[in-house]
Amino acid sequence: MELVINLGIATVSAVIGITYVGASSPVQAVQLFDFQYSFPSYQPNGTAISASGTLTTTDLDPIKNNYTITGITGTRTAQGITETIIGLLSPGIYGINDNFLNTSTPLLTKNGFSYLVSGSGEDGNGNVNVFYSSLDEGYSELSSNVDYGSFSVVTPRPVPEPYTVSGSLVALGFGWWTKRKQALASQKQPHKGIKLLSDF
């Protein structure tokens, strides 16, 4: 019985230890932006290309006044087929992308950001690049048979800090330990209405 109680205390201590490490470790701040865009087809009866999802970025760079996109999730629909966005491509991989997100219009640079989809993408290999053209004053996809259209993002929301999750683990560990302790205490007491041999 003491072993079980000690095990519970050890579990809580271990979780608290993890929490301490998580809270004390330096963590780079990140932001989440919900994005969406839609570009009409060049062809009169063509199909528009659209996409939506979430961009993960670094915190705001106060000198450049922009964010650097570090991740992406979502879906892209082209020619009536919805593709899953697999992940972000590193800078310079496709379309000389820099993966910058500006704080004001235009939201993207002429190099834009690039990502990989589950389908054929723009180049047949699943690569997609979204950029801004100052000449045409609009956003579009590189090499796609689409015109310029709209691109928008929603005000960023911060990603939960790691210690918030660790704090929840502490609460769960302590709750388990308390319930286990109460259960062990109730086993020591006889049930009501039942006589023990020692009572006679």
Image (cartoon, rainbow, N blue to C red):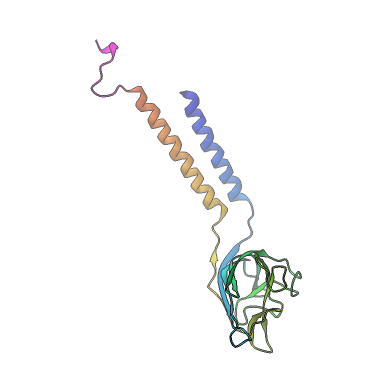
Let me know if residue 187 is in the magenta part: no
Let me know if residue 194 is in the magenta part: yes
Magenta stretch, residue numbers: 190-200
Q: Residue at x 57, y 53 (%)?
A: 162
Res 94 quadrant in image: bottom right
Would you place residue 136 above or below residue 120 in this image? below
Q: Residue at x 57, y 77 (%)?
A: 37
User: 73 left or right of 1?
Assistant: right
- The residue lying toward the viewer, choosing from 123 and 167, is 123
Would you place residue 6 above or below residue 132 in this image? above
User: 96 left or right of 166?
Assistant: right
Residue 34: percent from left, percent from top: 55, 70
Residue 11: percent from left, percent from top: 53, 35
Residue 142: percent from left, percent from top: 70, 78
Res 81 quadrant in image: bottom right
Magenta-drawn stretch, dominant element (helix, strand or loop): loop
Q: Quadrant of the C terminus?
A: top left
Res 17 quadrant in image: top right
Would you place residue 68 above or below residue 161 in this image? below
Residue 24: percent from left, percent from top: 61, 50
Q: Residue at x 53, y 50 (%)?
A: 165
Count the numbered circles shown.
Answer: 0
| Residue found at the far front of this picture | 45
Q: Residue at x 45, y 37 (%)?
A: 176
| Residue found at the far top of this picture | 200
- The residue lying toward the viewer, choosing from 38 and 24, is 38
